[in-house]
Image: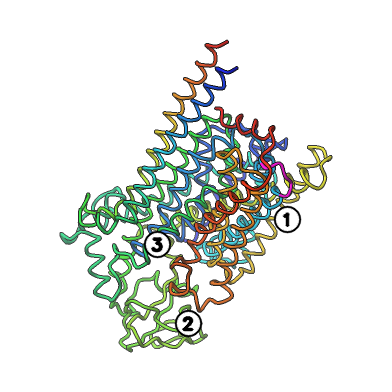
Amino acid sequence: MSVQNLTYLFVGITFALYITIAIRSRAGSTSEFYIAGKGVHPIANGMATAADWMSAASFISMAGIISFMGRDGSVYLMGWTGGYVLLALLLAPYLRKFGQFTVPDFIGTRYYSSLARIVAVICLIIVSFTYVAGQMRGVGIVFSRFLEVDINTGVMIGMGIVFFYAVLGGMKGITYTQVAQYCVLIFAYLVPAVFISIMITGNPIPQLGFGQQLVDEPVYLLDKLDLVMIDLGFRAYTSGMKETIDVFCITAALMLGTAGLPHVIVRFFTVPDVAAARKSAGYALIFIAILYTTAPAVASFARINLFESTHNISYTTAPEWFKNWERIGLIAWKDKNQDGKIQHAAGNAFEPAKPIFSDQAGDFGQREINNTANLENNNEVYIDRDIIVLANPEIANLPPWVIALVAAGALAAALSTAAGLLLVISTAVSHDLIKKTFAKNISEKKELVFARISVLVAVVIAGLFGIYPPAFVAQVVAFAFGLAAATLFPAILMGIFSKSMNKEGAIAGMLVGLIFTFSYILYFKFVNPQLNSSEYWLWGISPEGIGFVGMLLNLLVSNILRVITPNTPMHVQEMIDNIREP
Amino acid sequence: MDKFEENRKQYWSSNLKLVLSLLLIWFTVSFGCGILFADYLDQYTFFGFKLGFWFAQQGSIYIFVILIFIYIHRMKKLDEKFKNLNTEDD
């Protein structure tokens, strides 16, 4: 069977599976719709959390980013896993003990203020929509490359599926679908990684393999990669380029942001008790770590494979995948030295960095591009980092079913995260805005209707993001983590660990964190992107890492205000005592 | 009631002590070994990896998992102790 037919088959089977699960776990009450009736087993919740957490970015983009950044890519590995330690030790058990439906619920009750609740809802909606936009791009890429359907049709199919099981099953349906999606995505990630590890190093465990010697010569893989890269004018793969302070702040912002992401936190509301909340954080991190420790191995295998299969190879004999990805515009080649061969080197091959394709075919049949060649280096190739994981099985010549499996896995990753995000957005609207703020008297039945309508609206908006992708999708991911780190995380943390933190302090802190982080990112990413380099940054901290500074500011402001404004009321202090008990 | 208050305080302070010591390790392996001292650690090799690089791309993640499970285990014991103390009073 061809790759395309196999992909249709795999994607079809997995989609049928998700729908079946959704129908069997319909939600009948708001509690089931919002938090799956608190009846999810810790291991199942761990898997669901892992699928919820590992998005198109983790599955598709992360190994590619690490592949191109080398050592500097470690910020994502540590940042996106270390946050779970904070979540398990500092937040999850207490939020579960608190026992309500949403993150704004906690902030609104703990800080005895509907203003605090509304500020939390605003932060939640900005964070979650930013994140959803990225998932839609992932769905679009997979559909257009593997199923050769139009990107818009692909996005609509994906949205239809998510809509179906989110509206029908709510959190309950999503949870059990995510368990299935985790199994699909982790299998799809590991199979090619194991194959490639055996091919390159002879060791079936990728985590060990990338520290070993190559099969065809007695050299350590990472040493060889360092040598090849230095030879081509790059920095060594295992040494970093970013300033230490920036690496520190980005890692911190990602960790704190992870711990403050509403769609992750809400997963811990779904388990039966406090002990189960702790356990499911542990299981979630195990399930996540399986992918996150494989990713850096995949990254280094892919980088070395890329050089070996295309560097100094003439275009006409270049492997098929190179042309396939060129056809959809994620690879481009400009033959600067007119030798008909593909050459890699450090630096952008042309200006602007992204290719602008003309309709013409070049001398060797390549897609001609209108960019001006950058003559300061010898690089001739543009490669979109997002294709590394998807193209890896093709680059390594693996059988077609592996390629089809990876496509199904990527869709599982994107859809599971999108569903989780859409649910927290709609919950925030139907529960926190409608039920708790504007129409306090509505019945549970009515609230459930509103919840389903909000999912529908959220799905449509997310679908529009996918069909008309805002040009800034890639740049705004920094927003999601930075804002969660600077607003929600400190508000929840102090809500649990500082009895004397009052509403004045918490609200001012969240607002300062929000405005500072938002403006800093906005300034360097959109207002003055030409100034976006370390000499203009505050203390050399990039927009990706500024959320950490935002969090420190939040702590500072809220604690100053706490001292000069009235103390927390007695009933809130008692509530804190209560959530601190097991 | 006073006894109960005292138990509660004791429970909370043992909890804080445990969390702080685990977070110290969390900070040391990631921000310490993976970032601040990574260049220094790179002179040693570990299973074929430069040690600092290994901490940044592998080791810190394994230790994170272990930390959470130590926490689960210790908290389970602490919860039981707290529960027993309170039932003794009744």
Label 1 Cα crowd, 10 Å radius (few <14 / some 14-19 / many 20+): some
Compute the Cα span from label 3 to label 2: 29 Å
Q: Amino acid at mark 3?
A: Ile
* Labelled disc at residue A58: none
Residue A579: percent from left, percent from top: 60, 32
- The image shows residue B42, relative to residue A435, as above or below, that is below
| Mark 3 / mark 2, whichever is N-terminal | 3
| Mark 2 / mark 1, whichever is N-terminal | 2
Subunit bearing disc 2? A
| Residue situated furthest front in the rendering | A564
Label 3 Cα crowd, 10 Å radius (few <14 / some 14-19 / many 20+): some
- Residue that badge 2 annotates: A352
Quarter of the rendering occupied by the C terminus of chain B: top right
Q: Residue at x 60, y 61 (%)?
A: A133
Which residue is nearer to you in this view: B44 or A337?
Answer: B44
Does residue A6 appear in the picture of this structure?
A: no
Subunit bearing disc 3? A
- Classify residue A313 by image quadrant: bottom left
- Residue that badge 1 annotates: A457
Is residue A148 covered in magenta?
A: no
On the same chain, marks 3 and 2? The answer is yes
Residue A235: percent from left, percent from top: 29, 70
- Classify residue A268 by image quadrant: top right
The secondary element bearing badge 2 is classed as loop
Is residue A114 covered in magenta?
A: yes
> Start and end of the magenta stretch?
A111-115
